[in-house]
Each structure stands twice: as structure tokens, then as C-alpha cells.
Amino acid sequence: MPALRTTDLIGRDAELEQLTAQLGIRTSGTGQTVRSMLVAGDAGVGKTRLLMALRDAALDADWQVVAGHCLDLADSSLPYLPFSEILGGLVADHPDVTGRVLEAHPTLARLQPGRRIRSGESASGDQALDRGNVYDAFGHLLAAAAEHAPVLVIVEDAHWADESTRDMLSYLFSRPVPGVALVVSYRADDLHRRHPLRRQVAEWMRLRGVDRLQLEPLAADAVRLLVRALHPSTLSEAEYTSIVDRAEGNPFFIEELVDAAWSGQVPGELADVLLVHLDRLDETTRQVVRIVSVAGRQVSHGLLAAVSDLDAAALEAALRAAVDAHVLIASRGDTYAFRHALLGEAVYDDLLPGERMRLHADFVAALGEGRAVGTAAELAQHARRAHDVPVAVRASIEAGEEALAVGGPAEAATHFLDALELVDTSREPVPGIDDFALARRCAEALIASGRVAKAVKVLRARLAALPAEGADVDRGQLLTALASALLLTDSPESPSETAAEAVELLRTGPPKLLARALLVHAQTLVGWHDDQARAVALPALELAERHDLASLAVELHATVAGLDPEGGSSAVVGWRAAADRARRAGLIEPELRALYLLGRAHHDGGDLAAAVEVYREVIARSEVGGLTWSPYPAEARLLLAVVLTHQGLLDEAWELLDVSGQSPPMVSEWAYFAHQMFIVIGLRGRSKAQALERLREHWTTDGLTAISSAAAEILRAAAAGDGALALSVYDDVVTAVVPLWHEWFQARLRLATLALTAFAAAAHRQSADERECAARDVERLAADGGRVIDFYAPYDDSQGPEYRMWVARRTAEHLRWRWLAQVGPPSADELVSAWRTAEEAAVAYGSVPELAQTRVRLAGVLRAAGDADGARQVADLAREVARAIGAQPMLDELTAQGSTATPATSEHAASLTPREAEVLALVAEGRSNGEIGKQLFISTKTVSVHVSHILAKLDAASRTEAAAVARRRGLL
């Protein structure tokens, strides 16, 4: 893979602005405030790229720019090397000027690049360069060049500068040349205590007119921009986070990591660069650095002392040397860490396998024997890498429990998974470990962190390990946990059947286990078989109360709250009561579930404002409990964004789903991204085809991701008038989602309706034969929507206003296609009535974008039916909303209909009546008089009269000429 680079300056605008302003290159009236600037920063932090941008800015401001570079030639460095390069540049740019200066100062000629070759002669006496003369001559040269235009002199990599070059820089810093600005860069991390430049930098900073810019690592947002520039395809948040964490804001590290294609290893070229830092250290210091690399990101002084076996003085001397060499940094809390995390990785990777294992064993001994203070997670890590399985398993479990106790389910799940893996791969059973209980605990942590699919895999693996006979209690508990997990996933496996099997296995088992199985079984039945759910939950509640299972009783109350609310009140009241009861009991997960169901009740009932408040409450409560990415809060965030979108708050919805810098589960991250793409592509009409293509990879694992991204694709096809593409997307998403949900899932009605719009958009460009062929596909889509309606007919009373909105839209869109295609066209009254009904349904639900889209279509229908005033009123309402939410496709559709915000003022346009303009548009599409009459609900004879008037007004001899004239005059 070739190295990836970008020429854009990213994340350094403020630094560039500071340099150009202080040096007077770009001023806002303050003029030049300094003559010289030092630019300091670690290797790879972007000094050269910033200086390139500075050079470009200077050239744009009509400055001259010359640059010289110091090179790492060890003890063989040529004196004044960067100034030889600068002299060469000035000779090339200003031969006349440099010729006069060289004639006046012949000693300067010795610095010309072409004359600095091996001659075998030694310079002594008069032949040797006199430093004073050289300094003075170079100052005269710069002054002469500056007479033509200001000069920017750049010297890069001064940390490699020879003594003569450093002295020349001191001369120029202390005796600034009028019209000349000097910028010198160096690596701050190379300036150890004995580095000769360190003292001189301190001296330079005391001089008047000299300032320093310390180039810090890029901020996280800038790192993301750089990664996107280097790797334009869409990356997951985990991939971005990995780069941000490992690169620590260093652009060179970022480029190398991207170039390595996320291998997880430090690229070889980068490792070689990093390990050079160790070459100047003595062996004892290098050994201490190796121990720190084994410790992890940081290590306490006490733990390091316990492992190193060095006496206090030797350890302190080694640490001092490592800190002075900018390999380690001393942090707060008596700890040490690598200056760059990637340096630590490189040192660790450079260890021999046996050396690595021995050092990890030393850490295990120090922590296990209590010679140093550490965490269970540290002990588990070292024991695992030292191949001490029993210690690693027990420490991993302890670390997992510690993580859960402080609200870290993701970290807990990682520790439990490590323990399970060690148990599975161990040649001998680990004493005192119940791997089935461990698997259930691991699944709980995975679910709490939002990784439900992984929890299902863990539980299935344990079930497969059980013997075929016996072990009913273990099997029943695992099945209970599996059913609970399946309830939260898009899986073809039935959670209800799994829970029912668990209940039968635990029927004679401990009451607590049976009550838990009954609870989960009832939860799997809610929403589809409420009567059965109530029948299962109420006996379980009685069992829980009889055996003082208080927590289970609260969860059971929360389960039946919406099914059988107290006093016969609404489900909304029931879910609120259940959430309050769970909160009083201190049970956060049942509270989140009840709040989520309360939000859904408001949402499904069309009370969008109330849904917003409750969804926000779910998110806020989850953050308090450390369960931000557990299933209910994670989905509540998505549904909150959906509701905000319906309210017309598209930017707020987008920002809510921007999880940059956070660690959501992958399934949530892609669902969020899919809705963001629905906003920018589906509603706003922007082009991001590559993003949609990558989303398709996740259609078969998450229905919500599939629905949102497919809707965006279909709307994009509709905007392009591509019915065949819309149908293909529809078929693909149905194929992906049916195995996850069921054949006639409710969103299929919406998708079929959106696909109908694409066929309608294509109708005006199609011939009669093409429209007849399209009729088969259109009727299939309409029929699919009808089957969804039939499927939900038994539950019609429980369906909310959003469902009814799509029922009405499906009818209206189908009639609209028949009207535009003139295939069994409806009457004007039937068409207008259907769209008025769709408008009323959209108003009832309160969806701002869908109401605007409905009114766009209604305006076109009213205009065709002869109600110009009504069309104008509806179009103005739609246009106002479309502009407010940035819905460009809607604005384009209004324009295509001939609807404008202000009446046309053209002389030619004014000469045509509104009806004649409509007829002209259809004539230009190649429609016959009969087809035009049917579409505009007027007689063929009337169309003929309008066509005659049009030909006369446009002075055209034929329909074809009339269309051409109209296009030329901007009437179409």
C-alpha cells in the first residue's frame, strides 16, 4: 500500500495566523511585532507542514522566501550548511544583487554550494573563513535582497545545526536586518539537558524581537479531519478512536498508522524511527525503559522499584536519564509514562518473547505478593501474558466486578471475556471457577454495554458445551439469559420460545430462578400477545412476593404496568408508575426499560413533545447509572433523533447522533450513522454514495440501520427519477430485514410508498409503453403496502398517527402515479381528496418534513385540477418549511412544477396563462393532446385550443419548435 499524505494544512490555522501576524506577513494594522520566531515541537508534529504554509502565505503577500536545512551528519556536518543553501537560492533568484555583495565580500563566496567540495587542501591563515566577516557579509546579502521586497528566511531542524550555524543564528537574532524575518524550527524532544542548542534557545528568547511558538499535538477533532483526508472512506468510531489514542495528535504518527491500514501493530518504519530515541541511553536506562513498556501506559514508582531489582539510586539515575532524553515523562501521582504511547508500543514489540514473559511474571510476583500496589486489572493483564492461567482468571473476574461496581460495563465485559477465553483454552480446569455462572455474568455486562449480539454468542457457546442429559438448572439459567438477550436483538430466533423452554426446565427449580424465567417470558410476549404476557407475569409476581424477591417483584411490576395499569388508566400512566417504583428501589435497569416504553407510548401515540422529554430522561438516567450504551438508552437516543427530525430539528438530530470521541456499540453507531445519512441524503439531497454503500454491510444485522439507509437510497433514486433503482433498493432491504423481523414489517409500508414516488418522478420522461411496463412494478409496490395494512388490521385500534399517515400517503402516491402515467387515471376529485387526506394525516402526526413533502405533491395536484390559488397557498407553506430544514429536493420539485415564490415577470412568461404554461410543459415532454387532457382533467378539444394559442404567442410553426422556443426563453 503506498504511503498516504495530504497537502492540506489541518488543525494549524491558529498557529499560521500567529506567525503571519507577528512577522508582519498578514497584518490587521498592527504591523510586524517580532523580527524572529522559533518554532518548536516534537518530531512529526507538523513543523515542516506549517512552515510550508507560512512560505505560501508569504509568497501570496509578495514576499521573497529562502530556506535552508540542517542535516543529521553526526560529527561530519559542514559549517554554515543551511546558509549555503540560502545563499544558493539567492544567487539563483537575484544574480545581480548577490554578484555585487560577493564582490564586496569575497569570503562569502566560499559558502556557495558548488564550491563546497572536497579539495584535499586545509584552510589556514588567510584562507580560513573569518567568522566576523561571514556574519557581516551575510547580513549585507539579506539587506540587499530585502531592498526589492521583504524576505522570509527559514532555517529548519536547528537541533542538528553545527556550531557555526548556531553562532550565525545568534548573530542574526541579535542584529536583525531591516525587511527580513527569520524563522527557525527545531525538535523540542531532541533537546536533552546537554544538547548545545538548549542553552542557545534560552539565550535567544531573552533577545528583543524574538518569540517562540510551541507546536502542540493536534486536537482530537483535527486528528479526525486528517484521518478523513488520508482515508476518505467511512471509518467506525472505534477505528477513529484507535488512531486518536495511539497517535496522540502527532501528524506523522497518524499518517503512518493510516498507511499501515489499521493492522494494530506499530508500522516497521515508524518503530525504527521511535527506537532511535533509545540509542543514546546506557544499558541500565534501556532496561528500565523496557520494564516500563511491559507495565502498560503508565507505572507507579513503587511498582517499578519492586520489579526492577535496582537500588534506589540506580533506579532514580536511570529514570532521570530517560526523562532527560524525552523518552519517559514523570506524571502526577508518582507515576511514569512514555512521552509517546507509540514509543512504548515499539519498545514492547522489540522485546524477545522470553524476555516479555519473564518481565510479566515479575509484575505478577510483585503485585501478587503485595510488594507493590496495583489493580486487579493490572494483575490480570500481567498474569495472562505470563501464561499464569489460574491467577489471570481470578484476577480478570475480580477486575470485571470492580468495573461493574463503578459503572463500567464495557470494561467489565472485556475482563469477563478474557476470563472465559482462558478457561476455554486451559488444558486443566481452573479450580473454584463456575464457567456457566461466569458466562451469564459476562452476558449481563455485554448487554449493559450494548454488545447484545456478542452476549448471544457467549450464551450459545455455553449451551453447546452442556451435556445432552441433565444439567437442567444450568441449561434453564442460560436459556433465560439467552431469551433476555434475544429480546434486544434483530434475530430470527424466537425469544418467546427460548424463554418458555427455560420456564419448563426450571419449573421445579429454586423459586428465584423460576421467577426470573417467568419474568423474561412475560417480557418476550409484551406487544404481541399482551393477554398471554399478563397471564405469565401475574403468577410470577405472586411467586416473587411470596418468597421476598423484592427486586424481581419490581421488575415484574414494570413489565405488567403498561398492560394492566392501576385504576384502568392509560399505559402512559402505568409506565410512569413503574419507572418511579424502580427508581425508589434503586433498580436502574428496570427503570430504564419502563422509561423507554413510556417514551415509545408517547411516540407511537403521536405526542412527539412528550416523547422528546422522556427519551431525554432515559439518556440522562442511563448516564447516572453508567449504562449509556445499554440497549434501551442507546435506542432511545436514536428514537429521540427520529422525533427531532419529525419536528423539523434536523441539525439537532444530527448532533445528537454524533458520537465522536465516545464508544457506542457498533450496532448503535451504524444505526446512528444511517439516520444521519437519511437526513443529509434523503431529506437534504446531498451526495454521499460511498457512505450508503458501506451501510449496506450492516443491513442483515440491524433492521433500523437497514430501514434508515434504504429510505435514504430510495429518496435519492426518487430525486433522480429512477424508479428501477428505487425498486431494486426496496427489494434488497426487504430481503435483508424479513429474516430479522417478519414478512410484513410495518416499515415496509413506508418503504413501498417511497419507492412509488420514484416511479411517479420518472413517469413524465417515459413513453406510453414504458409506463405500461412500469405499471407492473408499481402495482406490486402498492400491493405490498396493502398487505402490510391487512396484516395490522387486527391491531388497527392500537396503531398510532404515524402509521395512519403512511396508509394515507400510500393511497395518494399510488393515485398520483396513475395520474402522471395515465394508466387507469383517477378523477380530479378522487386525486385531490386522497392528497387532502394525506395532508390531514401528516398534520395529525406532526411530522414537519413529511407534511411539507405531502404539500409539495398536493400543490402539483391542485394546480393540475385548476385550483391555482389553492396550489399557490399550499406550495408557499411547503416552500417555507423546505427552506427552513434545508430540503433541497423539495425545493427542486416545487420548481419543476412551475411553483415559484414570486410571480414570473418575464414578458414572454406573462403572455402565457397559467393553464397554457402547464400545457406547454406537457407538450415539451412529448405528450399527445389526449394524454394532456387526461392529466389536466380537461377535454382534448380544450387542449387543442390551448396548443394553438401557445403556437401563436411563441410564433412557432410546430409543437417541437414551441418547446425549443420555450426552453430558449427560459419558460421551461
Image (tube, rainbow, N blue to C red):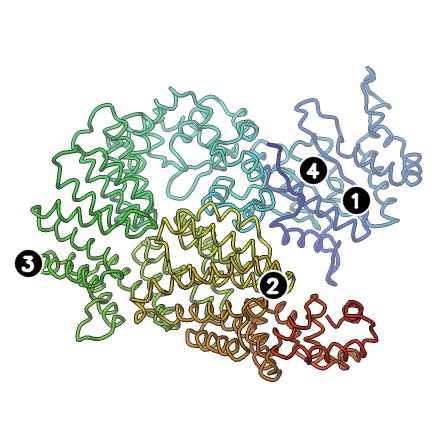
Q: Residue 453's x, y, as percent? A: 33, 45
Q: Quadrant of the N terminus?
A: top right
- Quick one: 40 or 173, which is closer to the camera? 40
Q: Is residue 288 above or below residue 528?
A: above
Residue type (three-letter) at the residue carrying disc 4: Glu
- Which mark is on residue 546? 3
Q: Nearer the viewer, mark 3 or mark 4?
A: 3
- Quick one: 741 or 941, which is closer to the camera? 941
The disc, 2 or 3, on the residue closer to the chain's N-terminal end is 3
Q: Could you tell me how far apart the alpha carbons at marks 2 and 1 are, in whole angstroms?
A: 62 Å
The disc, 1 or 4, on the residue closer to the chain's N-terminal end is 1
Residue at x 52%, y 80% (from the top left corner): 829
Q: Quadrant of the C terminus?
A: bottom right
Q: Quadrant of residue 469?
A: top left
Q: Could you tell me how far apart the alpha carbons at marks 2 and 4 are, in whole angstroms?
A: 65 Å
Residue designated by label 4: 156
Residue type (three-letter) at the residue carrying disc 1: Val
The disc, 1 or 3, on the residue closer to the chain's N-terminal end is 1
As helix, strand or loop, the secondary structure at mark 4 comes to strand
Q: Could you tell me how far apart the alpha carbons at marks 1 and 4 are, in whole angstroms?
A: 13 Å
> Mark 3 Cα within 10 Å, few/some/many (few <14, many 20+)?
few
Q: Nearer the viewer, mark 1 or mark 3?
A: 3
Q: Could you tell me how far apart the alpha carbons at marks 2 and 3 are, in whole angstroms?
A: 68 Å
The disc, 3 or 4, on the residue closer to the chain's N-terminal end is 4
Residue designated by label 2: 763
Q: Nearer the viewer, mark 2 or mark 4?
A: 2
Q: Is residue 901 left or right of residue 634?
A: right
